[in-house]
Image: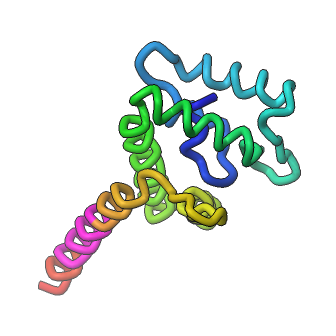
Amino acid sequence: MRRLAIFVGDFTAEAASLVAAGGEIAASEVVRSLANLVTKSLVALDAVSVITHYRLHETTRAYALEKLRESGELGDVARRHADYYRDLSGASRSGGGNIARARVADGLRPSDRPGSRGFGLGLLADRLCSTAARALSTSATARASASR
């Protein structure tokens, strides 16, 4: 549960499995644990839309975030979180469309609690800028080649 604290808002089972898995924890174990946490009412489930979303309750998230810090895993989990949303933003540019863009926006929302900070956002911003710069460079090169 502590690794799920990296998500400030809603997240999908896919996001949870890719971000929280690592080391001794397999992606399949993350999904099983997520279902167990929903059963115990520690994670809220929103199955109204096409994609099911989950959310840690704020008190649960605060506790889990403290445990994540204490474990020394915060940096690794924040990097996986940043990588997931960077890759998702690439999917939105390459035809993933509005759903992928909305999911990226959800993942980038800062916490609305005073004094709290989103983790991995600086790293994510760097990686997104780098990805965008490569995409723009590739696009400009393709346009220049086409105009010759």
Q: Measuring 65% from the left and 47% from the top, which residue is drawn there?
A: 11
Residue at x 43%, y 37% (from the top left corner): 74
In the visual, does 147 lie left or right of 101?
Answer: left
Give the position of the C terminus as an image quadrant.
bottom left
Q: Residue furthest bottom?
A: 147
Say whether residue 115 is left or right of residue 61: left
Q: Residue 92 or 7: which is nearer the viewer?
A: 7
Choose top left, top right, bottom left or bottom right for residue 134.
bottom left
**Which residue is painted at 46% across and 13% down in the image?**
24
Q: Position of residue 53 (x, y in %)?
A: 74, 46
Residue 136 position by quadrant: bottom left
Left or right: residue 146 versus residue 92 is: left
Please check the rendered image and state whether residue 139 is part of the magenta-colored stretch, yes or no: yes
- Does 31 sit above or below residue 12? above
Q: Residue furthest top?
A: 24
Secondary structure of the magenta portion, mostly? Answer: helix
Give the tally of numbered discs. Answer: 0
The residue closer to the viewer here, 5 or 23, is 5
Q: Is residue 148 shown above or below 137?
A: below
Q: Is residue 96 visible?
A: no
Q: Is residue 108 visible?
A: yes
Is residue 18 rendered magenta in the image?
no
The range drawn in magenta is: 130-141
The x, y position of residue 117, in whole percent, is 51, 59
Colouring of the image: rainbow
Please state, as top left, top right, bottom left or bottom right, where the N terminus lies in the image: top right
Residue 87: horizontal and vertical position, in percent? 42, 50
The x and y percentages for residue 79 are 37, 43
Q: Nearer the viewer, residue 41 or 72?
A: 72
> Image quadrant of residue 2?
top right
